[in-house]
């Protein structure tokens, strides 16, 4: 009798199938739950710059390029027009105050001066003639008044005698009345003559004052034309360097035309252009430092030019103490302009990464120096060396600070030596 053989449940085939299924499930679970699916890129470490984040003193400043200029520059403008007959000093030479630089010629100005001078001479003669005439008239008036006084005295004597005779009944009433009328008439004529003379004297004073006023104005006009003629000789208003003169003999100059400039060599200033980004933070009195031949000279901003050209505005700075020996007009030099007081901060070295990320994120290297991962950060102020870190980094972190232009959108960088 044959014995029935029972089939085993856990046979080799079944075990193999279950084992394979378990491995597949485990692989899928790892892939979905544990595995890193972030985009990666292999990067050679010798082609990047890795910088350390650290604590330190943050000194907020910017480096600007300044140009040495004279402390004062006096522009030479033509006060009057004319053509150049002489040029006594060339540009680039030192001049003293009052030195003649140019001589100009203007025939019309000379003609106007002569006409004005002639008019003044005519008025002087008119005034003298008027005074002489009035003096003669005064003599005549005095003579007339003297004659009247003589006649009045004469007629008064007659009248007084007739009055006695009339009282004695020697002369008639008609004869007495006539002598009284004649006497009263002369007295009245004298009164009228005095009033007439007073009026004529007042009128004479008015005429003289009018002539004197006209003469004074004409003489002022003569003086003005004389000064105008003197301005045909162009002189140095101050001592200094005649740095430029843009005219030649025979050339015609218009009134108000700039013909050159004189630099006062007793001091220097520095003019620098600054990015308009900083315009709200620049003010008079702001401190700056000028490094020259290994020595630092303190400076300060004294003037701000508000006009913005090509995204930049200009400022003038002067030396607070001594002016460096040896600097020259037109010399260019970097200036350290302080924007704030130093303070403690977390510092991230400046690098090319900022132009790719805007300072919003960086690649932070892990402790094993094998990979770098993206991390969001917040930056604050900046100087030429460091950014101020406000959030996202701590001292000791290693950050890739070179350009990210070749990394694309990769989230993880695998570092290779």
Image (tube, rainbow, N blue to C red):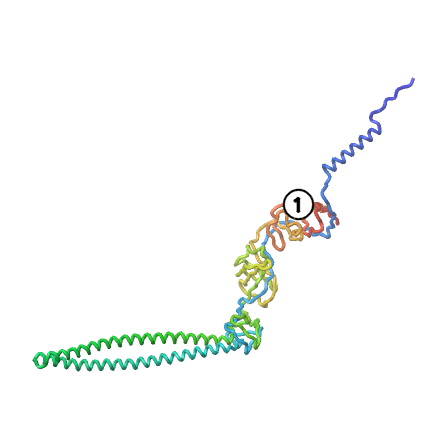
Q: Nearer the viewer, residue 130 or 42?
A: 130
Q: How busy is the neighbourhood of tag 1: few (under 14 within 10 Å), some, or many (20 plus)?
A: some
Q: Residue furthest front?
A: 174
Quadrant hosting residue 186:
bottom left
**Considering only vertical position in the picture, is 68 above or below 365?**
below
Q: Residue furthest right?
A: 1
- From the viewer's perspective, tell me whether residue 124 is left or right of residue 276: left
- From the viewer's perspective, tell me whether residue 341 is left or right of residue 357: left
Quadrant hosting residue 328:
bottom right
Local SS, label 1:
strand
- From the viewer's perspective, tell me whether residue 158 is left or right of residue 205: left
The reply to whether residue 367 is in sight is no
The tally of labels here is: 1
Q: Where is residue 344 shown, x and y percent of the image? A: 58, 50
Quadrant of the rendering where the N terminus is positioned: top right
Q: Nearer the viewer, residue 273 or 291?
A: 273
The reply to whether residue 360 is in sight is yes
**Considering only vertical position in the picture, is 82 above or below 47?**
below
Q: Where is residue 78 shown, x and y percent of the image? A: 52, 72
Quadrant hosting residue 17:
top right
Q: Where is residue 142 shown, x and y percent of the image? A: 25, 80
- From the viewer's perspective, tell me whether residue 207 is left or right of residue 170: right
Q: Nearer the viewer, residue 317 or 153?
A: 153
**Considering only vertical position in the picture, is 217 above or below 38?**
below
Image point 44% across, 78% down: which residue? 115
Q: Which residue is mark 1?
A: 375
Image point 38% across, 75% down: which residue? 214
């Amino acid at each position: 009798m044959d014995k029935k053989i029972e089939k085993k449940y856990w046979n080799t085939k079944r075990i193999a199938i279950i084992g394979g299924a378990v491995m597949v499930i485990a692989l899928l679970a790892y892939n979905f739950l544990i595995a890193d699916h972030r985009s990666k890129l292999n990067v050679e470490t010798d082609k990047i710059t890795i910088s350390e984040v650290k604590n330190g003193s943050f000194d907020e400043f910017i480096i600007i390029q300044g140009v040495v200029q004279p402390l004062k520059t006096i522009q030479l403008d033509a006060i009057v027009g004319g053509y150049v007959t002489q040029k006594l000093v060339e540009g680039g030479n030192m001049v003293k105050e009052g030195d003649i630089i140019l001589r100009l010629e203007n025939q019309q100005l000379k003609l106007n001066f002569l006409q004005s001078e002639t008019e003044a001479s005519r008025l002087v003669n008119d005034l003298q003639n008027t005074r002489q005439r009035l003096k003669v008239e005064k003599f005549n008036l005095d003579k007339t008044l003297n004659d009247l006084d003589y006649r009045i005295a004469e007629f008064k004597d007659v009248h007084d005698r007739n009055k006695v005779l009339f009282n004695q009944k020697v002369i008639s009433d008609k004869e007495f009345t006539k002598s009284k009328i004649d006497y009263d008439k002369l007295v009245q004529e004298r009164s009228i003559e005095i009033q007439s003379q007073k009026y004529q004297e007042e009128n004479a004073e008015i005429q003289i004052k009018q002539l004197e006023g006209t003469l004074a104005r004409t003489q002022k006009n003569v003086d003005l034309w004389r000064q105008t003629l003197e301005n045909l000789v162009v002189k140095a208003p101050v001592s200094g360097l005649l740095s430029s003169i843009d005219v030649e003999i025979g050339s015609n100059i218009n009134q108000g035309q700039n013909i050159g400039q004189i630099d006062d060599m007793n001091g220097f200033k520095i003019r620098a252009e600054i990015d308009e980004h900083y315009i709200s933070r620049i003010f008079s009195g702001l401190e700056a430092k000028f490094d020259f031949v290994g020595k630092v000279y303190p400076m300060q901003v004294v003037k701000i030019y508000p006009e913005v050209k090509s995204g930049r505005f200009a400022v003038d700075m002067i030396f607070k103490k001594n002016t460096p020996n040896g600097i020259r007009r037109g010399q260019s030099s970097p200036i350290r302009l302080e924007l704030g007081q130093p303070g403690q901060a977390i510092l991230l070295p400046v690098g090319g990464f900022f132009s790719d990320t805007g300072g919003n994120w960086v690649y932070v290297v892990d402790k094993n120096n094998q990979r770098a991962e993206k991390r969001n950060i917040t930056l604050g102020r900046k100087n030429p060396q460091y950014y101020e870190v406000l959030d996202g980094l701590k001292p000791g972190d290693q950050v890739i600070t070179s350009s990210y232009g070749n990394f694309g959108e990769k989230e993880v960088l695998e570092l290779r030596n």
